[in-house]
Amino acid sequence: QLAVVESGGGLVQPGGTMRLTCRASGFSLEFYNVAWFRQAPGKERAGIQCIIRRRNARFYTDHHRERFTISRDNVLNEVYLVMHRLQPEDTAIYYCAAVAGENCPAEEAEWTYWGQGTQVTVSS
């Protein structure tokens, strides 16, 4: 079965660091663009960062650029999102998505694979 699965969420204190992992099964993430999205309580899901399969990372919003870093390990078939200096407003369900092609689509419907999400809660 072709799928992506997120892991690494949980409870973290404000100011802490967390690494999320997106793992693919049934296909190689190396040939896909992969993005992280998040949906905070009461808000719409929004893109955080996207990594192009053959180029450097792209960013959906500058707001996350300094604190969040996306990377990939093609050997392990995983993509990561490392988040630093987490704040309560970062509390959300975090999703990864994958799509073939040369860009990171702005429309969610254009992404081929979506994970079920992993909950991140920032609280003291």
Image (spheres, grey):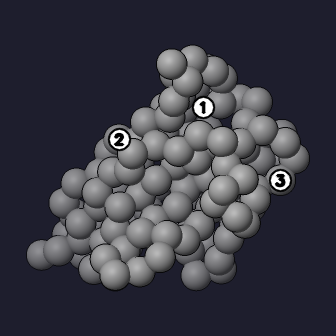
Mark nearer the N terminus (1 vs 2): 2
> Dot 2 corresponds to which residue?
7
Instruction: Look at the image and tell me whether residue 15 can be seen.
Output: no
**Does the CB distance between marks 3 and 1 fall below 8 Å?**
no
> Dot 3 corresponds to which residue?
103
> Dot 1 corresponds to which residue?
73
**Does the CB distance between marks 1 and 2 fall below 8 Å?**
no
Q: Farthest front residue?
A: 109
Residue 28 percent location from the top left of the image? 66, 23
Spatial separation of the CA atoms under disc 2 and disc 3: 25 Å
Residue 52 percent location from the top left of the image? 77, 47
Query: Relative to 40, is 5 above or below?
Result: above
Q: Dot 3, crowdedness within 10 Å: few (<14), some or many (≥20)?
A: some
Q: Dot 2, crowdedness within 10 Å: few (<14), some or many (≥20)?
A: some
- Compared across the picture, whether 124 is left or right of 116 comes to left
Three-letter amino acid code at the position of disc 2: Ser
Three-letter amino acid code at the position of disc 1: Asp
- Compared across the picture, whether 110 is left or right of 88 comes to right
Spatial separation of the CA atoms under disc 3 and disc 1: 19 Å
